[in-house]
Amino acid sequence: MKYRINRMEIAGSLGDLGVLLPIAVGMVLVNHLPPSGVFMAIGLYYIFSGMYFGVTTPVQPMKVIGSYGVAMALSPDVIQASSLWVGVLLLAIGLSGAMKQITRFVPRVVIRGVQLSTGVLLMAQGVRLILGTSSTQVKAGLSEPFLAVSSLGGLQLSWVFGAIAVVLTLFLINNRRFPAATVVVGFGFLMGLLLGRGVPLSGLGLHLPELFPTGLPSWVSFSTALFVLALPQLPMTLGNAVLANEDLAREYFGDGASRTTGKALCISMGLANIGSFILGGIPMCHGAGGLAAHYRFGARTAGSNLFIGGLFVIVALLFGSQVLAIAQLVPMSVLGALLIFAGAQLAMTVRDISDRKEYFVCIAMLGITLASNLALSYLVGIGLHHLLKRDMFDI
């Protein structure tokens, strides 16, 4: 069935909030992006992706742009310019057929290396969110910066919430009656309602999104966005959001993922980022980590996309600029627990590797990713694989 909405689909649709919300919230707070535009763009992309691809399809922030943009507190027009740039570049790659050539050149072991590296990065970020050491938490000086109460004496609430969320997930990970992600996110919302700053019901109404809410970027912003954000993002996007995502979709859904091709993924992301530029949203992609998260927590059909996308759209329409307060109700440590299990699911895709040289490539890529970044790891992995194919090297 192409569309199915039940407890498991709903739980699976929530599985990737651990990646999505922290970066989206960070870019609203630090880069001053309009929250209603950010959430509306995310919701629409979820809906249209599900309708086209016909299977569970992830929507994630572009992490190079998101992380660097937040770290450097770049202005909203630079972020918006980067959305347009990556949209145009990905659309050009998809429409030109260049993705076919890239797919032929990139071996399967490099895709596995990307999946392993991304999975470990997600797990590490999940642990940081629970320990209260992520960049957002450190900058705020609080382990739960969006709650009214962050600690009880010397006991950080992120440790308590994180531990409870991990235990709940462990016990319910395969439970169909009480799906893990639904219970864990529900627990998070309950804690947010009890210990948060309240729900802004006064602003409830119909809030239509504004087009070009931050205005059109200047030429300086466009040039900065191209060289500082868009070009560094591109190798990671092609490796993780296209090649690794296509491979994982085929593994999970078989013939059901016939539309999930490199060309289609590039065109999808290209159009989405041009749309996000118009609405004032964040740069978005189809990350393999997101697919692993949705699948691990129960999503199997495009119904999960319709549910989570519809939820984002409705909340954005009803709350407008106050939508950020709704997202901040879920403690960061609870999102961290979801990240740990989603990352483990993705990292375990390397289990089908048996060749020593291929293991070496994957481990080397992981090391480079941890020391530098995933884009460099992806490029080095390709070169290393072709080098080790020669008989003169023995690992």
Image: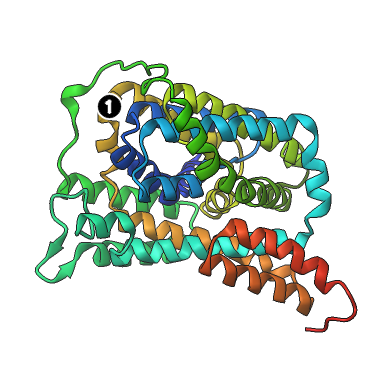
**Quadrant position of the N terminus in the picture:** top right
Name the amino acid type tagged 1. Ser
Rendered image quadrant of residue 198: top left
**Quadrant position of the C terminus in the picture:** bottom right
> In this view of the protein, which residue sits in the foreground, 86 or 1?
86
Q: Residue at x 36, y 65 (%)?
A: 128
Rendered image quadrant of residue 56: top right
Q: Is residue 22 left or right of residue 345?
A: left
From the image, tell me which residue sits under label 1. Answer: 321
Q: Is residue 67 left or right of residue 155?
A: right
**Helix, strand or loop at mark 1:** helix
Q: Is residue 129 visible?
A: yes
Vertical placement of residue 333 versus 77, above or below: below
Q: Residue at x 43, y 34 (%)?
A: 78
> In this view of the protein, which residue sits in the foreground, 167 or 339?
339
The location of residue 29, given as percent across then percent down, is: 28, 40
| Label 1 neighbour load within 10 Å: few <14, some 14-19, many 20+ | some
